[in-house]
Image: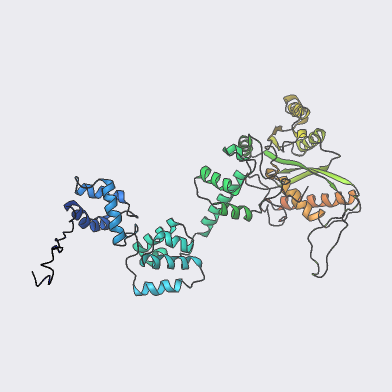
Amino acid sequence: MEELYPGKIRNNRFFLPSEIKLPQPPERKLVLLALLPDLVKADINKRLTAVNLWRAYKLIHPNGYSEPGFNYIYSRWRALNKINVFANSKVQHLTADELRTLESWRHHNIRRYWQQAIVIKGSFEGKTPFELADRTGCAIETVEEWIALFKAEGLTGIERKSNSNKEEVAAKVTRRIDNLIKILHQSPSIFGINRTSWSLDTLASTFVSEYKDNMSSATAQAYLKSRGYGFRKAREVLTSPDPNFKEKLDKVIAIVSTLGTNDKFFSIDEMGPFAIRIRGGRSIMKLDNRKTIPAHPIPKGYLICTAALELSTNQVTHFYSPNKSTSEMIKLMDLLMIQYRTADKLYLSWDAASWHNSKILKDHIKEVNTTEYRDINHTPIVAIAPLPVSSQFLNVIESVFAGLAKSVLHNSDYASTEDCKRAIDKYFETRNAHFIANPHKAGNKIWGKEIVKPSFYEAHNCKDPRVR
Protein backbone atom coordinates (compact mmCIF):
# COMPACT_ATOMS: atom_id res chain seq x y z
CA MET A 1 0.00 0.00 0.00
CA GLU A 2 2.96 2.25 0.82
CA GLU A 3 4.22 1.65 -2.69
CA LEU A 4 0.89 2.82 -4.16
CA TYR A 5 0.54 5.88 -1.92
CA PRO A 6 4.06 6.80 -0.67
CA GLY A 7 4.09 9.17 2.33
CA LYS A 8 0.31 9.25 2.64
CA ILE A 9 -0.51 6.14 4.63
CA ARG A 10 0.30 7.79 7.99
CA ASN A 11 -1.59 10.97 7.07
CA ASN A 12 -4.84 10.99 9.05
CA ARG A 13 -6.46 13.22 6.47
CA PHE A 14 -5.79 10.83 3.59
CA PHE A 15 -8.56 8.45 2.54
CA LEU A 16 -8.23 5.61 0.14
CA PRO A 17 -10.16 6.44 -3.06
CA SER A 18 -13.37 4.48 -3.53
CA GLU A 19 -13.88 2.55 -6.75
CA ILE A 20 -16.12 4.49 -9.22
CA LYS A 21 -18.54 2.26 -11.03
CA LEU A 22 -20.23 3.70 -14.17
CA PRO A 23 -23.94 2.90 -14.36
CA GLN A 24 -24.76 0.27 -16.94
CA PRO A 25 -27.66 0.90 -19.34
CA PRO A 26 -30.67 -1.31 -18.75
CA GLU A 27 -30.92 -4.49 -20.74
CA ARG A 28 -33.86 -3.34 -22.91
CA LYS A 29 -31.93 -0.20 -23.94
CA LEU A 30 -28.99 -2.33 -25.04
CA VAL A 31 -31.40 -4.51 -27.00
CA LEU A 32 -32.93 -1.43 -28.66
CA LEU A 33 -29.54 0.09 -29.56
CA ALA A 34 -28.49 -3.21 -31.12
CA LEU A 35 -31.74 -3.42 -33.04
CA LEU A 36 -31.87 0.18 -34.39
CA PRO A 37 -29.49 -0.34 -37.38
CA ASP A 38 -31.63 -3.25 -38.59
CA LEU A 39 -34.85 -1.28 -38.08
CA VAL A 40 -33.45 1.64 -40.11
CA LYS A 41 -32.20 -0.63 -42.86
CA ALA A 42 -35.53 -2.45 -43.12
CA ASP A 43 -37.65 0.71 -43.28
CA ILE A 44 -39.18 1.06 -46.76
CA ASN A 45 -40.47 4.62 -46.37
CA LYS A 46 -38.76 7.58 -48.01
CA ARG A 47 -38.09 9.16 -44.62
CA LEU A 48 -37.10 7.55 -41.33
CA THR A 49 -39.93 8.71 -39.10
CA ALA A 50 -39.76 7.68 -35.45
CA VAL A 51 -43.35 6.47 -35.32
CA ASN A 52 -42.83 3.94 -38.15
CA LEU A 53 -39.66 2.59 -36.57
CA TRP A 54 -41.34 2.37 -33.15
CA ARG A 55 -44.22 0.35 -34.61
CA ALA A 56 -41.73 -2.08 -36.20
CA TYR A 57 -39.86 -2.28 -32.86
CA LYS A 58 -43.07 -3.06 -30.91
CA LEU A 59 -43.83 -5.96 -33.24
CA ILE A 60 -40.52 -7.51 -32.19
CA HIS A 61 -40.63 -6.43 -28.50
CA PRO A 62 -44.25 -5.89 -27.41
CA ASN A 63 -43.12 -5.10 -23.84
CA GLY A 64 -40.40 -2.68 -24.94
CA TYR A 65 -40.24 1.09 -24.67
CA SER A 66 -43.30 3.29 -25.12
CA GLU A 67 -43.26 5.75 -28.02
CA PRO A 68 -41.84 8.77 -26.06
CA GLY A 69 -39.01 6.65 -24.57
CA PHE A 70 -38.24 5.14 -27.98
CA ASN A 71 -38.21 8.59 -29.61
CA TYR A 72 -35.70 9.92 -27.07
CA ILE A 73 -33.25 7.04 -27.50
CA TYR A 74 -33.73 6.98 -31.30
CA SER A 75 -33.09 10.73 -31.74
CA ARG A 76 -29.90 10.62 -29.61
CA TRP A 77 -28.67 7.50 -31.46
CA ARG A 78 -29.34 9.14 -34.84
CA ALA A 79 -27.49 12.31 -33.84
CA LEU A 80 -24.54 10.33 -32.45
CA ASN A 81 -24.25 8.27 -35.64
CA LYS A 82 -24.94 11.26 -37.96
CA ILE A 83 -27.88 9.56 -39.65
CA ASN A 84 -30.51 11.85 -41.22
CA VAL A 85 -34.12 10.97 -41.94
CA PHE A 86 -33.29 10.36 -45.62
CA ALA A 87 -30.63 7.74 -44.92
CA ASN A 88 -32.46 4.99 -46.82
CA SER A 89 -33.49 7.13 -49.80
CA LYS A 90 -30.05 8.67 -50.42
CA VAL A 91 -27.89 7.59 -53.32
CA GLN A 92 -25.67 4.79 -52.03
CA HIS A 93 -23.30 4.18 -54.93
CA LEU A 94 -21.85 6.08 -57.90
CA THR A 95 -19.63 4.50 -60.53
CA ALA A 96 -16.69 6.30 -62.10
CA ASP A 97 -18.62 6.68 -65.38
CA GLU A 98 -21.61 8.13 -63.56
CA LEU A 99 -19.39 10.61 -61.74
CA ARG A 100 -17.83 11.77 -65.05
CA THR A 101 -21.29 12.17 -66.61
CA LEU A 102 -22.61 14.12 -63.65
CA GLU A 103 -19.58 16.39 -63.73
CA SER A 104 -20.26 17.17 -67.39
CA TRP A 105 -23.92 17.86 -66.55
CA ARG A 106 -22.84 20.44 -63.98
CA HIS A 107 -21.48 22.57 -66.86
CA HIS A 108 -24.39 21.91 -69.25
CA ASN A 109 -26.25 24.88 -70.77
CA ILE A 110 -29.61 23.25 -69.89
CA ARG A 111 -30.46 24.10 -66.31
CA ARG A 112 -32.25 20.79 -65.67
CA TYR A 113 -29.00 18.84 -66.19
CA TRP A 114 -27.18 21.09 -63.72
CA GLN A 115 -29.96 20.59 -61.16
CA GLN A 116 -29.91 16.81 -61.53
CA ALA A 117 -26.11 16.66 -61.21
CA ILE A 118 -26.25 18.69 -57.98
CA VAL A 119 -29.06 16.51 -56.59
CA ILE A 120 -27.49 13.10 -57.34
CA LYS A 121 -23.95 14.02 -56.23
CA GLY A 122 -25.26 15.89 -53.19
CA SER A 123 -27.40 12.93 -52.13
CA PHE A 124 -24.40 10.62 -52.48
CA GLU A 125 -22.38 12.99 -50.26
CA GLY A 126 -25.06 12.86 -47.56
CA LYS A 127 -26.92 16.13 -48.15
CA THR A 128 -30.63 16.05 -47.40
CA PRO A 129 -33.27 16.65 -50.09
CA PHE A 130 -34.23 19.83 -48.26
CA GLU A 131 -30.70 21.18 -48.68
CA LEU A 132 -30.61 20.08 -52.34
CA ALA A 133 -34.02 21.61 -53.06
CA ASP A 134 -32.84 24.91 -51.60
CA ARG A 135 -29.61 24.78 -53.64
CA THR A 136 -31.26 23.97 -56.98
CA GLY A 137 -34.55 25.84 -56.61
CA CYS A 138 -36.56 22.63 -57.16
CA ALA A 139 -39.51 21.37 -55.18
CA ILE A 140 -38.67 18.79 -52.51
CA GLU A 141 -40.94 16.30 -54.32
CA THR A 142 -38.93 16.74 -57.54
CA VAL A 143 -35.64 16.11 -55.71
CA GLU A 144 -37.00 12.92 -54.12
CA GLU A 145 -38.39 11.77 -57.47
CA TRP A 146 -34.99 12.20 -59.20
CA ILE A 147 -33.20 10.31 -56.42
CA ALA A 148 -35.73 7.45 -56.57
CA LEU A 149 -35.47 7.25 -60.38
CA PHE A 150 -31.68 7.23 -60.26
CA LYS A 151 -31.64 4.44 -57.66
CA ALA A 152 -34.07 2.39 -59.76
CA GLU A 153 -32.79 3.05 -63.30
CA GLY A 154 -29.51 4.96 -63.05
CA LEU A 155 -28.82 8.05 -65.16
CA THR A 156 -31.11 6.83 -67.94
CA GLY A 157 -34.04 7.17 -65.53
CA ILE A 158 -33.55 10.91 -65.04
CA GLU A 159 -31.96 11.86 -68.36
CA ARG A 160 -33.97 14.43 -70.33
CA LYS A 161 -35.97 12.54 -72.94
CA SER A 162 -37.01 14.00 -76.25
CA ASN A 163 -40.72 14.63 -76.49
CA SER A 164 -41.94 12.23 -79.14
CA ASN A 165 -45.53 13.37 -78.84
CA LYS A 166 -45.30 17.13 -79.09
CA GLU A 167 -48.75 17.51 -80.61
CA GLU A 168 -50.39 15.81 -77.65
CA VAL A 169 -48.48 17.98 -75.18
CA ALA A 170 -49.33 21.14 -77.15
CA ALA A 171 -53.01 20.14 -77.18
CA LYS A 172 -52.92 19.61 -73.42
CA VAL A 173 -51.39 23.06 -72.86
CA THR A 174 -54.02 24.61 -75.13
CA ARG A 175 -56.79 22.94 -73.14
CA ARG A 176 -55.29 24.23 -69.88
CA ILE A 177 -55.11 27.78 -71.23
CA ASP A 178 -58.68 27.60 -72.55
CA ASN A 179 -59.95 26.35 -69.18
CA LEU A 180 -58.07 29.13 -67.38
CA ILE A 181 -59.63 31.79 -69.62
CA LYS A 182 -63.09 30.27 -69.12
CA ILE A 183 -62.62 30.94 -65.39
CA LEU A 184 -61.27 34.44 -66.07
CA HIS A 185 -64.42 35.34 -68.02
CA GLN A 186 -66.58 34.66 -64.95
CA SER A 187 -66.86 36.70 -61.77
CA PRO A 188 -64.82 35.48 -58.76
CA SER A 189 -68.00 35.57 -56.65
CA ILE A 190 -69.44 32.70 -58.73
CA PHE A 191 -66.67 30.50 -57.29
CA GLY A 192 -67.21 31.72 -53.72
CA ILE A 193 -64.28 34.18 -53.75
CA ASN A 194 -64.92 37.50 -52.01
CA ARG A 195 -63.21 39.66 -54.62
CA THR A 196 -64.44 41.98 -57.36
CA SER A 197 -61.67 41.02 -59.78
CA TRP A 198 -59.25 38.16 -60.28
CA SER A 199 -55.70 37.99 -58.97
CA LEU A 200 -53.17 35.47 -60.26
CA ASP A 201 -53.27 33.54 -56.98
CA THR A 202 -57.07 33.24 -56.87
CA LEU A 203 -57.18 32.41 -60.58
CA ALA A 204 -54.64 29.60 -60.17
CA SER A 205 -56.26 28.19 -57.02
CA THR A 206 -59.71 28.23 -58.67
CA PHE A 207 -58.27 26.38 -61.69
CA VAL A 208 -56.86 23.70 -59.36
CA SER A 209 -60.18 23.23 -57.54
CA GLU A 210 -62.28 23.25 -60.73
CA TYR A 211 -60.14 21.00 -62.95
CA LYS A 212 -58.15 19.00 -60.34
CA ASP A 213 -54.94 19.96 -62.13
CA ASN A 214 -51.94 21.72 -60.59
CA MET A 215 -51.21 25.31 -61.58
CA SER A 216 -49.08 28.00 -59.98
CA SER A 217 -49.69 31.74 -60.22
CA ALA A 218 -46.54 32.06 -62.36
CA THR A 219 -47.88 29.48 -64.82
CA ALA A 220 -51.24 31.26 -64.89
CA GLN A 221 -49.48 34.53 -65.70
CA ALA A 222 -47.46 32.91 -68.50
CA TYR A 223 -50.60 31.29 -69.97
CA LEU A 224 -52.51 34.58 -69.93
CA LYS A 225 -49.57 36.43 -71.46
CA SER A 226 -49.43 33.88 -74.30
CA ARG A 227 -53.01 34.87 -75.21
CA GLY A 228 -52.34 38.59 -74.91
CA TYR A 229 -53.91 39.09 -71.48
CA GLY A 230 -52.50 41.32 -68.79
CA PHE A 231 -53.60 43.64 -66.03
CA ARG A 232 -55.36 46.59 -67.64
CA LYS A 233 -57.56 49.40 -66.48
CA ALA A 234 -61.26 48.75 -66.21
CA ARG A 235 -62.09 49.89 -69.74
CA GLU A 236 -61.24 46.49 -71.19
CA VAL A 237 -63.83 44.02 -69.93
CA LEU A 238 -62.49 40.48 -69.50
CA THR A 239 -64.81 39.30 -66.74
CA SER A 240 -68.58 39.25 -66.85
CA PRO A 241 -70.35 40.23 -63.60
CA ASP A 242 -73.47 38.30 -64.67
CA PRO A 243 -74.43 35.92 -61.80
CA ASN A 244 -76.07 33.64 -64.39
CA PHE A 245 -73.01 33.65 -66.63
CA LYS A 246 -72.57 29.88 -66.75
CA GLU A 247 -76.26 29.13 -67.36
CA LYS A 248 -76.51 31.62 -70.24
CA LEU A 249 -73.22 30.47 -71.70
CA ASP A 250 -74.21 26.80 -71.51
CA LYS A 251 -77.44 27.61 -73.32
CA VAL A 252 -75.60 29.34 -76.19
CA ILE A 253 -73.06 26.50 -76.41
CA ALA A 254 -75.89 23.95 -76.52
CA ILE A 255 -77.52 25.85 -79.41
CA VAL A 256 -74.26 26.10 -81.38
CA SER A 257 -73.39 22.44 -80.83
CA THR A 258 -76.82 21.16 -81.93
CA LEU A 259 -77.53 23.42 -84.91
CA GLY A 260 -79.55 21.74 -87.64
CA THR A 261 -78.15 21.47 -91.15
CA ASN A 262 -80.42 24.31 -92.28
CA ASP A 263 -80.23 26.46 -89.10
CA LYS A 264 -78.27 29.71 -88.99
CA PHE A 265 -76.52 31.31 -86.01
CA PHE A 266 -75.74 35.05 -86.10
CA SER A 267 -73.34 37.05 -83.96
CA ILE A 268 -74.71 40.62 -83.93
CA ASP A 269 -73.41 43.97 -82.73
CA GLU A 270 -72.85 47.60 -83.66
CA MET A 271 -69.46 49.18 -84.31
CA GLY A 272 -69.31 52.81 -83.31
CA PRO A 273 -70.19 55.54 -83.32
CA PHE A 274 -66.67 56.27 -84.59
CA ALA A 275 -65.41 59.55 -86.03
CA ILE A 276 -64.30 59.94 -89.65
CA ARG A 277 -60.98 61.69 -89.11
CA ILE A 278 -57.30 61.30 -89.72
CA ARG A 279 -56.05 58.31 -87.73
CA GLY A 280 -52.72 56.93 -86.69
CA GLY A 281 -51.53 53.35 -86.69
CA ARG A 282 -48.62 51.06 -87.48
CA SER A 283 -47.14 51.28 -90.97
CA ILE A 284 -43.86 50.59 -92.76
CA MET A 285 -41.64 53.67 -93.07
CA LYS A 286 -38.01 54.69 -92.90
CA LEU A 287 -36.58 54.45 -89.42
CA ASP A 288 -35.45 58.08 -89.41
CA ASN A 289 -38.98 59.30 -90.26
CA ARG A 290 -42.04 59.37 -88.03
CA LYS A 291 -45.60 59.92 -89.18
CA THR A 292 -47.45 62.61 -87.24
CA ILE A 293 -51.14 63.41 -86.89
CA PRO A 294 -52.96 66.31 -85.17
CA ALA A 295 -53.72 65.76 -81.50
CA HIS A 296 -57.37 66.84 -81.91
CA PRO A 297 -58.38 66.46 -85.56
CA ILE A 298 -61.78 67.81 -86.61
CA PRO A 299 -64.18 64.94 -87.44
CA LYS A 300 -65.81 64.92 -90.87
CA GLY A 301 -68.72 62.89 -89.59
CA TYR A 302 -69.65 59.81 -87.56
CA LEU A 303 -70.71 56.29 -88.46
CA ILE A 304 -72.43 53.37 -86.76
CA CYS A 305 -72.08 50.05 -88.58
CA THR A 306 -74.69 47.45 -87.59
CA ALA A 307 -73.66 43.95 -88.67
CA ALA A 308 -74.42 40.25 -88.29
CA LEU A 309 -71.93 37.42 -88.82
CA GLU A 310 -73.37 34.03 -89.79
CA LEU A 311 -70.99 31.50 -88.28
CA SER A 312 -71.49 28.47 -90.51
CA THR A 313 -70.93 30.35 -93.81
CA ASN A 314 -68.80 33.18 -92.35
CA GLN A 315 -70.87 35.81 -94.20
CA VAL A 316 -71.37 39.35 -92.89
CA THR A 317 -74.59 41.32 -93.41
CA HIS A 318 -74.22 45.04 -92.61
CA PHE A 319 -75.75 48.48 -92.98
CA TYR A 320 -75.27 51.94 -91.43
CA SER A 321 -77.48 53.15 -88.61
CA PRO A 322 -78.24 56.67 -87.36
CA ASN A 323 -78.27 55.37 -83.79
CA LYS A 324 -78.29 52.24 -81.63
CA SER A 325 -81.92 51.37 -81.06
CA THR A 326 -84.54 48.64 -81.14
CA SER A 327 -85.79 49.82 -84.53
CA GLU A 328 -82.36 49.13 -86.02
CA MET A 329 -82.39 45.61 -84.54
CA ILE A 330 -85.83 45.00 -86.05
CA LYS A 331 -84.53 46.29 -89.38
CA LEU A 332 -81.58 43.87 -89.22
CA MET A 333 -83.83 40.95 -88.21
CA ASP A 334 -86.20 41.58 -91.13
CA LEU A 335 -83.23 41.82 -93.50
CA LEU A 336 -81.81 38.49 -92.28
CA MET A 337 -85.21 36.76 -92.60
CA ILE A 338 -85.35 37.83 -96.25
CA GLN A 339 -81.71 37.04 -96.97
CA TYR A 340 -81.93 33.58 -95.34
CA ARG A 341 -85.53 32.85 -96.33
CA THR A 342 -84.77 29.19 -97.11
CA ALA A 343 -83.37 28.47 -93.62
CA ASP A 344 -85.42 26.61 -91.01
CA LYS A 345 -84.44 28.69 -88.00
CA LEU A 346 -82.38 31.81 -87.30
CA TYR A 347 -80.62 32.26 -83.96
CA LEU A 348 -79.72 35.87 -83.10
CA SER A 349 -76.95 36.25 -80.51
CA TRP A 350 -76.07 39.66 -79.06
CA ASP A 351 -74.98 41.29 -75.84
CA ALA A 352 -77.22 42.53 -73.02
CA ALA A 353 -77.70 46.11 -74.30
CA SER A 354 -81.13 47.54 -73.46
CA TRP A 355 -82.21 47.88 -77.11
CA HIS A 356 -81.43 44.17 -77.62
CA ASN A 357 -83.88 43.22 -74.89
CA SER A 358 -86.78 45.63 -75.29
CA LYS A 359 -90.46 44.68 -75.14
CA ILE A 360 -91.00 46.05 -78.66
CA LEU A 361 -88.32 43.72 -80.03
CA LYS A 362 -89.75 40.71 -78.18
CA ASP A 363 -93.23 41.48 -79.46
CA HIS A 364 -91.90 41.70 -83.02
CA ILE A 365 -90.22 38.31 -82.66
CA LYS A 366 -93.49 36.82 -81.43
CA GLU A 367 -95.26 38.30 -84.45
CA VAL A 368 -92.80 37.00 -87.08
CA ASN A 369 -92.93 33.55 -85.48
CA THR A 370 -96.70 33.21 -85.84
CA THR A 371 -97.90 30.64 -88.35
CA GLU A 372 -99.94 33.27 -90.20
CA TYR A 373 -96.94 35.60 -90.68
CA ARG A 374 -94.63 32.81 -91.77
CA ASP A 375 -97.15 31.39 -94.27
CA ILE A 376 -97.62 34.77 -95.90
CA ASN A 377 -93.96 35.86 -95.93
CA HIS A 378 -92.31 32.40 -96.16
CA THR A 379 -89.77 33.24 -93.44
CA PRO A 380 -87.90 31.04 -90.95
CA ILE A 381 -88.45 30.88 -87.20
CA VAL A 382 -86.45 33.45 -85.19
CA ALA A 383 -84.94 32.64 -81.78
CA ILE A 384 -82.73 34.66 -79.42
CA ALA A 385 -79.46 33.41 -77.89
CA PRO A 386 -78.42 36.31 -75.61
CA LEU A 387 -74.89 36.51 -74.23
CA PRO A 388 -74.17 37.19 -70.54
CA VAL A 389 -73.86 40.78 -69.33
CA SER A 390 -70.59 42.56 -70.30
CA SER A 391 -69.27 39.62 -72.33
CA GLN A 392 -68.17 41.36 -75.52
CA PHE A 393 -65.16 39.05 -75.46
CA LEU A 394 -67.52 36.22 -76.48
CA ASN A 395 -69.22 38.10 -79.32
CA VAL A 396 -67.50 36.72 -82.42
CA ILE A 397 -68.33 39.70 -84.63
CA GLU A 398 -66.14 41.86 -82.38
CA SER A 399 -63.19 40.00 -83.91
CA VAL A 400 -64.43 40.89 -87.41
CA PHE A 401 -64.74 44.53 -86.33
CA ALA A 402 -61.13 44.39 -85.11
CA GLY A 403 -59.97 43.15 -88.52
CA LEU A 404 -62.05 45.83 -90.25
CA ALA A 405 -60.58 48.60 -88.10
CA LYS A 406 -56.99 47.49 -88.71
CA SER A 407 -57.57 47.19 -92.46
CA VAL A 408 -59.59 50.29 -93.40
CA LEU A 409 -59.67 52.63 -90.38
CA HIS A 410 -56.14 52.67 -88.99
CA ASN A 411 -53.84 55.06 -90.88
CA SER A 412 -56.87 56.45 -92.75
CA ASP A 413 -57.82 59.99 -93.72
CA TYR A 414 -61.14 59.73 -95.59
CA ALA A 415 -62.50 62.88 -97.17
CA SER A 416 -66.07 62.12 -96.11
CA THR A 417 -68.31 59.55 -94.47
CA GLU A 418 -69.28 58.32 -97.96
CA ASP A 419 -65.64 57.50 -98.73
CA CYS A 420 -65.37 55.57 -95.47
CA LYS A 421 -68.62 53.70 -96.20
CA ARG A 422 -67.30 52.66 -99.62
CA ALA A 423 -64.12 51.31 -98.03
CA ILE A 424 -66.10 49.33 -95.43
CA ASP A 425 -68.51 48.01 -98.08
CA LYS A 426 -65.59 46.89 -100.22
CA TYR A 427 -63.95 45.18 -97.22
CA PHE A 428 -67.05 43.11 -96.40
CA GLU A 429 -67.73 42.40 -100.08
CA THR A 430 -64.20 41.01 -100.56
CA ARG A 431 -64.34 39.10 -97.28
CA ASN A 432 -67.70 37.48 -98.08
CA ALA A 433 -66.55 36.52 -101.58
CA HIS A 434 -63.42 34.90 -100.20
CA PHE A 435 -65.33 32.71 -97.74
CA ILE A 436 -67.90 31.71 -100.35
CA ALA A 437 -65.07 30.50 -102.58
CA ASN A 438 -63.05 29.05 -99.68
CA PRO A 439 -65.56 27.79 -97.08
CA HIS A 440 -62.96 25.69 -95.24
CA LYS A 441 -60.28 28.35 -94.94
CA ALA A 442 -61.85 30.59 -92.32
CA GLY A 443 -59.56 32.02 -89.70
CA ASN A 444 -56.09 33.43 -90.03
CA LYS A 445 -55.21 32.38 -93.59
CA ILE A 446 -55.96 35.69 -95.31
CA TRP A 447 -58.00 37.52 -92.70
CA GLY A 448 -55.24 37.26 -90.10
CA LYS A 449 -55.98 40.67 -88.68
CA GLU A 450 -59.08 39.28 -87.03
CA ILE A 451 -58.31 38.32 -83.43
CA VAL A 452 -59.93 34.87 -83.39
CA LYS A 453 -61.47 32.43 -85.83
CA PRO A 454 -65.13 33.15 -86.70
CA SER A 455 -66.61 30.44 -84.46
CA PHE A 456 -68.26 30.64 -81.04
CA TYR A 457 -65.99 29.42 -78.25
CA GLU A 458 -66.15 30.36 -74.58
CA ALA A 459 -62.36 30.81 -74.22
CA HIS A 460 -62.21 33.41 -77.02
CA ASN A 461 -61.36 37.05 -76.45
CA CYS A 462 -63.05 38.60 -79.49
CA LYS A 463 -62.99 42.18 -78.28
CA ASP A 464 -59.98 44.29 -79.29
CA PRO A 465 -59.56 47.01 -76.61
CA ARG A 466 -58.24 49.43 -79.27
CA VAL A 467 -61.46 49.22 -81.31
CA ARG A 468 -64.19 51.38 -79.75
Q: Nearer the viewer, residue 305 or 2?
A: 2
Image spot of residue 376 (x, y percent): 77, 28
- Left or right, 24 with reference to 240: left
* Residue 187 shows in this picture: yes
Image spot of residue 134 (x, y percent): 46, 61
Quadrant occupied by the N terminus:
bottom left
Q: Nearer the viewer, residue 382 or 188?
A: 188
Image spot of residue 254 (x, y percent): 60, 37
Image spot of residue 150 (x, y percent): 37, 64
How many labels sit on residues? 0
- Left or right, 412 with reference to 202: right
As drawn, 341 above or below 449: above
Residue at left offset 9%, top offset 71%: 2
Colouring: rainbow
* Residue 179 shows in this picture: no
Residue at left offset 72%, top offset 28%: 369
User: In the picture, residue 319 is in which quadrant?
Assistant: top right
- Left or right, 106 with reference to 225: left
Residue at left offset 86%, top offset 39%: 322
As drawn, 216 above or below 117: above
- Left or right, 365 with reference to 35: right
User: In the picture, residue 170 is in which quadrant?
Assistant: bottom right
User: In the picture, residue 382 is in which quadrant?
Assistant: top right
Q: Nearer the viewer, residue 435 or 108?
A: 108
